[in-house]
Amino acid sequence: MTVVGRALGRVQLWLGSAPPDPRAMAVVARHVLVFNLVGLAVVALLLLALSAGARDPAGRTAIVVTTLGYLAVALPVGVLAVLRRQRLTAAWLGGRRPLTPEVAAQALRLPVDVTIVVGLGWLGGGVLVGVVGAVASDLSLVGLRVGLAALLGGVAAVGHSYLLTLRLAGRITAEALAAHPPEGTPVLGVRPRLLLTWVLTSGVPLLGLALLFLDPSNPAGPREDAVVFLVLTALVVGAVATHLTARSVGAPLRDLRRAVQRVGEGDHDVRVPVDDAGEIGLLQEGVNTMAAGLAERERLRDLFGRHVGTTVAQRALATGVSLGGELHTVAALFVDIAGSTTLVRRTGPEEMVGLLNRFFAVVVDAVEDGGGLVNKFEGDAALCVFGAPAEHPDPAGAALRAARRICAAVAAAGELDVGVGVAYGPVWAGQVGAARRLEYTVIGDPVNEAARLTDLAKDHPGRAVVSEPAVRAAAGGESAHWAPGDAVELRGRDEPTRTWVLTVG
């Protein structure tokens, strides 16, 4: 059994080299022929064991001569019949024809066509040697015995030919399925293979054993050596059939298990070769479709997160999106580049884009590391929120730390000058827009206040001005980095705003 498995494995490995070529058909034909000749030899040995000691040399000689003559005709005719039925497949493999849907459909029928030709060959041979045996032997029942033995051997050979071709033609099947998947119900399913395996491992051997004892030409019963030979043959035939069936079902399932495991680990680029035209092939295609869908979903999730922020994206995926929102107490951070109009004239638009990208990278890192959300980019400015849509344990402190980090990073780079404003208070946070186009935003006085404070910060040495409520609400000693500033009346506000500024030095 191990030797058979290794031999089939080497053949399958050779056939697996892409692309398939004309030798694939020759290899299939050669191995099917060898397998059927082995089956014929087994049937002949069984008949010799059954007729050991009988005095019927004339009948035996006639059967042998008939069998040899039939083989001389049937073998080349069978090969030509398979090639004729598979002429489009042979032309495709030889590079003489493209892989059209018609060619693909014929290539997928290769195991069935081989099985039909082999079955007709064994049926004709069984009937022929049975008739010759009945005519040439002293007992006409000898012909019945010979014919039944040949037909039972033919059933076993036909089943093994189907399973063997199914495995050897795996590469051809994969290429045909990849180019033109079949439509409709699969005909090469798992159930027919398992039923065929039962016939080969149990049905034929048990029926043959029963016929030994019911043989009317041998009232005394079968010889022990005939029974032992049949049992040993059944064991070998059953082992080969089970190996072929287990290989055709188990190997794809093992690949599918590994693919699903890799998908579960986050590898959405995995693909399984579709080399089966039955339910297993549908399952392979389903896993590939699932992995592709997950990869596309992950790509959309990534793009969605990049455009609206990871927190907003996760919330939308979890709860859906709709017009509306809710009140949150947040810290709003607004950052703006000072002198951007003069800067773009000096650098040009292309270089200005590079400066903006480097600047916004600093802003995104500082805000997201603090658990905040970069809500939107507005030209050369950005609005950031701490405390919405997800709750934050210390939104004011996180916003103030992000402001200090942004100012320090921009000053160290020396490419730009900025102003940062931070305000704290209740806002409305949610989706605005229309049913077909939504945007997550925050609306409230702290947002406007932060934007106004940014204008003041551009003229302050520390480049950051924040509202007093933001400093008072900050935890963890964050207020030590800030000093009281002036009370100013901001545009659009009726009462003075107490400000704090970032300490310098």
Image: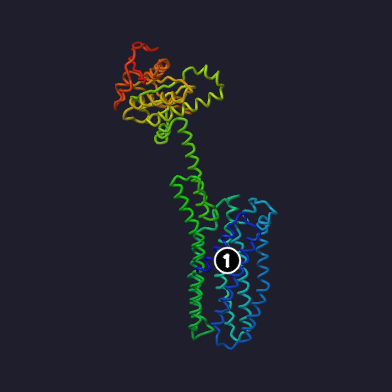
Crowd tier of the residue under label 1, counting other residues whose Cα lies within 10 Å: few below 14, some 14–19, many 20 or above = many
Amino acid at circle 1: Ser
Q: Is residue 257 above or below residue 124?
A: above
Can you give x and y, in whole percent of width and height, for residue 221 in the image? 49, 84
Please give the count of numbered marks on the rendered protein.
1
Rendered residue at 54%/70% (across/down): 156
Q: Position of residue 59 (x, y in %)?
A: 62, 84
Quarter holding the C terminus is top left
Q: Which residue is mark 1?
A: 161
Residue nearest the viewer, comparing 334 with 251: 334
Q: Is residue 436 above or below residue 174?
A: above
Residue 263 coordinates in the image, percent (x, y)? 46, 47
Residue 460 relative to residue 1: left or right:
left
Judge from the rendering whether residue 475 lies leftward or rightward of residue 130; answer left or right.
Answer: left
Question: Where is residue 158, by image quadrant?
Answer: bottom right
Q: Residue at x 56, y 21 (%)?
A: 348
Q: Nearer the viewer, residue 236 or 376?
A: 376
From where the camera sits, is residue 127 visible? yes
Please tell me whether mark 1 sits on a helix, a strand or a loop. Answer: helix
Is residue 148 at least partly visible in the picture?
no
Is residue 302 found left or right of 96 in the rendered image?
Answer: left
